[in-house]
Amino acid sequence: MTSNIRVPLRRWRLKDFDEGEGAATRAFDPLSTDDGWIEVAAPGDVYLALAAVGRIPDPFSDRAEQACAWVKDREWWWRTDFDAPDIANDQRLILDFEGLDTYAAIWLNGDLLGRSDNMFRAVRFDVTARARRGRNRLAVCFSPPSSMVADQKMPLWSIIGDPIQQTKRNFIRKAQFGWGWDWGPSLPTVGIWKPVSIRTETSAALQSVKFTTLDLSTTHDRAKISVEIEVEVFGDAQQLSAQVALIGSAGDNCIDQNVTVRNGRGRLEATLENPRLWWTPELGEPARYALTVALNSQDRTLDQRALMVGIRTIALDQSPDPEEQGATFFRFVLNGVPIFARGACWIPASSFVAAVDEAHYRRLLEAAVEANMNMVRVWGGGVYEHDAFYDLCDELGLLVWQDFMFACAPYPEHDPLFVDNVAAEVAYQIERLRHHPSLALWCGNNENQVVQGFMNALKKRNDPLLGDLFYAQMMPAAVAKLDPTTPYWPGSPFGGPSANSMIAGDVHDWTVWHGMPPVPVDRPVGKFDLSPESVAYTRYAEDSGRFISEYGIQASPVMTTLMRCLPEDQRYLSSPALLNRIKDRPKNKVDAMLVSVTGMPRTLEQYVDYTQITQAEGLKFGIEHFRRRKPHCSGSLIWQLNDCWPGVSWSLIDYYGFAKASSFYVRRAYAPVMASFKATDDGSVELWVVNDSLNSIEAELEVALKTFSGERVWSDSVAKSVGANQVAVVWRSDATRLDVDSRHVLTVRAHNNLVPPNRHFFAPIKDLNRITPSSMEIEIEQSGAHELAVHLSSKAYLYFVHLLVADERTRFSDNYFDLAGGEKRTVRITNESAPLRRDDVVVRWR
Ligand code: BMA
């Protein structure tokens, strides 16, 4: 055991002042009373603390965002009293803030200790000389962020909405989305958003522990790893050494070795025989190892660190694509295996970033794995997430594309203080996250190069990108130095003749939804076009990109969510409270998509269904196209997985955790082995099988042409093998056999459950010639207190069959599917947290 003690400081008090008033009235004074101060936890959030005592409404309710607008303009003081641990002569006392949001002055016992101006850096103070025996008073003053940058000048681009332009967010090292985004409210946070503790250290302390998989043999039977240790020696520590242990999940001790520490450094390299590798879910187990490092001086353990690590190699293949002239791959290679990244972009899981806990992360990340994802992209307008996020990604086998936190703006690279601040942030975050096996990529920012490129093309200029210093020089140098085995990429999107090029790098495809002109290679940039033809989701088929790291369609959350956040008199189409939940502009942008897919909704209920149908069908179409292009396209990251509040957005899962229809469509379209139809220009249809697994598979499929009333026109049996990690056309119908119209549906079913069922329509959803029955056969069986089995069947074809339970913790074995005439399906519904009863379930269809 070490003699070090770490005491978390969790209980604080909070009070607001006019700017400057706190110090003037000696809010830092150890003797001042707690009158008018309210309780707050650290980590914690000011809005939530205020709502708890009734000073503001629930910020997510109705239009409360406006009623909370004053919070960001106040000065906030956080205060706590603590007893300092006793320390010996060879010890020091460290005050450790893992994250302060954002402009903070820290006071101890009435003295100013220092300041902090970056939410993404830790702040540590040696308080050995300042702390008193017994009671100490710690106070942190947070200044209103906008007033700290009031005199800064550099215009923002007007791409995320005008009011947000006024914030000067690009000067503030703080979560950019907090000022409002096209899916989120303007509720800039303030306060202690990460743990704070006081701890003792004895003579020397571990500064960093770095674990690296250096090499993996092609047959995977041998891995070379290294452990590097950095130590700060501040006392008289003799004969420093580190005991390094690596233990597998079965308790097998792979390494137990003593490493000499000289000049503050120690290093160990070892070769492991038959290591259990870290894999994504479709390729294997995400095996992890427990790494512990104990820093010893003679017989005494001074410090200790424990990390969960994984053995894997990750690379980014950008070699020329031999089959697509002039193009280069953009594909991740995990343990030597080129993979197709199936995933989504991650935004902060709450506007109140301090308040996201492990359970919240777990719900969302498990839902990502259930949707057959293997990658999430931590988008650059949010935060470097809490440790629990990355631990869960490690545990679940989800690769992480990690943006640095810069988004949709020029950044002040001409300001040396800002540059130093960013350099320290970049180094801190790399050292913090580099040991995670899930970490697949460091990426410079979100959309800065591409927007600058657009501006230049429109204005026929060649202005440099302000901030490029960070993405083109500082970050790659820092990654090369501190984490050289993780790939670096300058921005998303980036690569090729223009940043959003289809022949190299990654692509954000916003033709669908935003009406962005398709990416020009050798043409001048076109015009944004929001006409229904321009934004139709079938335009995903024009995308010939290498890796689509953003594309998406907005949809309403489920009705239960709307009921929770809309007051009773606002539950109608286009009500002011509903429009307030739509942050993209124009607020009716979705209409251009609905008009050609479902037609326009007349009721709130239709709005929920029609937007969800359009999102689900559109993403299905896009995913199937991108996956059929494997390996030329090697990634699909949907914009966006989750929400930061109960809004109308591109998310697959809403703020409370209710899945939209798209979650289930995506689950099927992302199945590692998947079959999809493709209509070709000559009027025929092909059936493709995509195999992301490492085994060759035998596809035994039945393809059938039916009418919606249940008549079988013809069917074919297909038996074809598809090689490991390959795609293949396994069936093709010529136009003559397809004498079809809006009454027909082409279906595929696997005899051996190898692929999820799929279908192809010959007309838009709204024009399908179906007779929708008003009833179906439904039998709900109580198979356990927390489990129901719902047996469904229908004589005629049913579209968009879905089961609703008004508890977001409910899970469904499948949902939002079509039921062919005569088909029987059983859906298993479970809820580990609450009992389920038969009448909790509502079954609907369209
Ligand atoms: C891209 C993202 C986000 C944005 C989304 C939807 O621009 O990077 O900034 O929210 O599209 O517009």
Image (tube, helix red, strand yellow):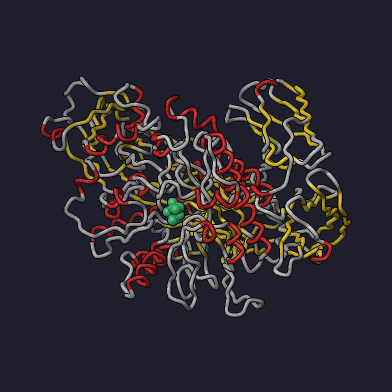
Compared with residue 263, is residue 183 higher up or lower down, i.e. above or below? above
The residue nearer to you, when weighing 261 against 149, is 149
Indicate the position of residue 604 as horizontal and vertical percent values: 52, 34
What residue do we see at 58% from left, 76% from top? Answer: 327
The mark total stands at 0
Between 454 and 154, the residue placed more toward the observer is 454
Report the side of 741 relative to 75 (left or right). right
- Residue plotted at (78% across, 26% down): 779
Q: Is residue 391 visible?
A: no
Residue at point 86% right, 49% down? 712
In the rendered image, residue 321, in percent from the top left (x then y), is placed at 62, 75
**Quadrant of the snapshot with the C terminus:** top right
Residue 520 position (above or below residue 184): below
Say which residue appears at 18% left-offset and 50% top-offset.
150
Question: Quadrant of the rendered structure where residue 560 is?
Answer: top right
- The picture quadrant where one finds residue 450 is bottom left
Tell me: 801 left or right of 132.
Answer: right
Q: Which of 262 and 138 is in front in this view?
A: 138
Q: Give the image quadrant in which the ligand numbered 1 is located.
A: bottom left
Above or below residue 511? Residue 284 is above
For the question of whether residue 177 can be seen, the reply is: yes
Could you say where residue 489 lies in the image, as x and y percent from the top left? 47, 65
Q: Where is residue 585 in the image (x, y as percent from the top left)?
A: 40, 50
